[in-house]
Image (cartoon, rainbow, N blue to C red):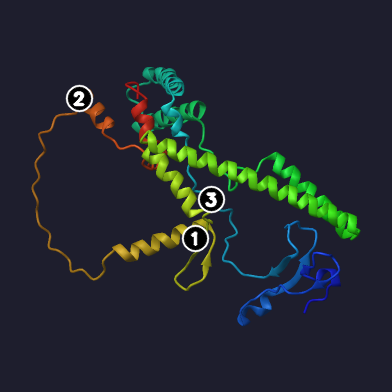
Amino acid sequence: MFPHRNIHKYTWNSPDGKTHKQIDHVLIDRRWQSSVLDVRSCKGVDCDTGHYLLIAKVRERLAVGKQAAQRFDRQRFNLRKLNEPEVKEEYQIEITNRFAALENLNENEDINRTWENIKENILTSVQESLGLYEFKQNNPWFDEECLGLLNQRKRTKMKWIQDPSQSNLDSLNNVRREVSRHFRNRKRAYLRAEIEELETNSRIQNIRDLYRGINDFKKGYPPRCNIIKDEKGDLLADSHRIVDRWRNYFSQLFNVHGVKDVGQTEIHTAETLVSEPCASEVELAIDEVKSHKSPGFDQIPAELIKVGGRKI
């Protein structure tokens, strides 16, 4: 359908390197047939198989705004380090030193400005002592040694493509077996270590890490999709339009229209006779706050307040 050289039309190569066929194709709905601009095979990509990678160039229209998309991702701190006594003590010392400078502030200063200073000191202290949480890779067992073997297999395959002789074919098969054996052993070792970690968490009653590890095995790799549909069914990819769409949706969902006006009724209220909380009551309320919960708009988890001590 698309004009290409024969080497870009073949999608499968026999093990002996003498037979070439086109057995892989791209399926698309008839209504989107005009959106396909080009289809070809790519021989240079190393997939360790007799099939070549098939590349399709598709034209699609997405509702993307011209403004740069604003990121709403919050920072996620490595709160697991608070279980280490040295790191916990370092965080408390950092908090103490930073809050000592706030004791000389003027009492008449704006309360919002004071809270901004407190929040900034807490976030700065946790970044220096705990750091950010590092998400796991898709394949943690794939290291530099695996990458080197992968590049070696790619070079050997390119050499065989340029000169399809029997010696180059035998060399390619030997490298393929060696690389596959190495990858298989590294993955088995990684899975064995993960299973031992799950057994350890189960033995020491670390239920949170136990179920988290089990979920990682069950769900696999969850792809992220930041695209939603508007009222007409069109796709929205811009973050500002996505936020506006959710705002309008919940506004229509929760706001009840057509309710009759309620007559004005004079309501007398009395001031509650509740004294201001003392320091011990505040400390007790902070200690009862649940851990492992998502932070609010200030991005300060409850664990940082609880571990901070009396200075916070």
Q: Is residue 135 something that shows in the picture?
A: no
Q: CA distance from mark 2 to mark 3?
A: 42 Å
Residue 144 in sight in this render:
yes
Residue with the mark numbered 2: 278
The residue depicted at 70 percent of the width and 43 percent of the height is 146
Kindly report the distance in space between the C-alpha atoms of the residues bearing marks 1 and 3.
11 Å
**Among the two numbered marks 1 and 2 on one chain, the one whose residue lies closer to the N terminus:** 1
User: Where does the image place residue 108, in percent across and percent down from the top left?
Assistant: 33, 25
Residue 310 found in image quarter: top left
| Number of other residues with Cα within 10 Å of mark 1, as a class: few under 14, some 14 to 19, many 20 or more | some
Q: Residue at x 39, y 63 (%)?
A: 248
Q: Residue at x 67, y 47 (%)?
A: 183
Residue carrying label 3: 70
Q: What percent of the width, then of the height, locates residue 186?
A: 63, 43
Q: Classify 10 Å Cα crowding around label 3: few (below 14), some (14-19), many (20 and above).
A: few
Q: Secondary structure at mark 1?
A: helix
Q: Tag 2: Cα neighbours inside 10 Å, few (<14), some, or many (≥20)?
A: few
* Amino acid at the residue labelled 3: Gln
Q: Residue at x 63, y 70 (%)?
A: 60
Residue corresponding to mark 1: 241
Q: Amino acid at mark 1?
A: Arg
SS for dot 3: loop
Residue 30 at x, y = what percent? 62, 82
Work out whether residue 30 or residue 249 is closer to the camera in this orientation and state it.
30
Quadrant containing the C terminus in the rendered view? top left
Looking at the image, tell me whether mark 1 or mark 3 is earlier in sequence order.
3
Q: Nearer the viewer, residue 184 or 290?
A: 184
Left or right of residue 183: residue 123: left
Does label 2 or label 3 sit earlier along the sequence?
A: 3
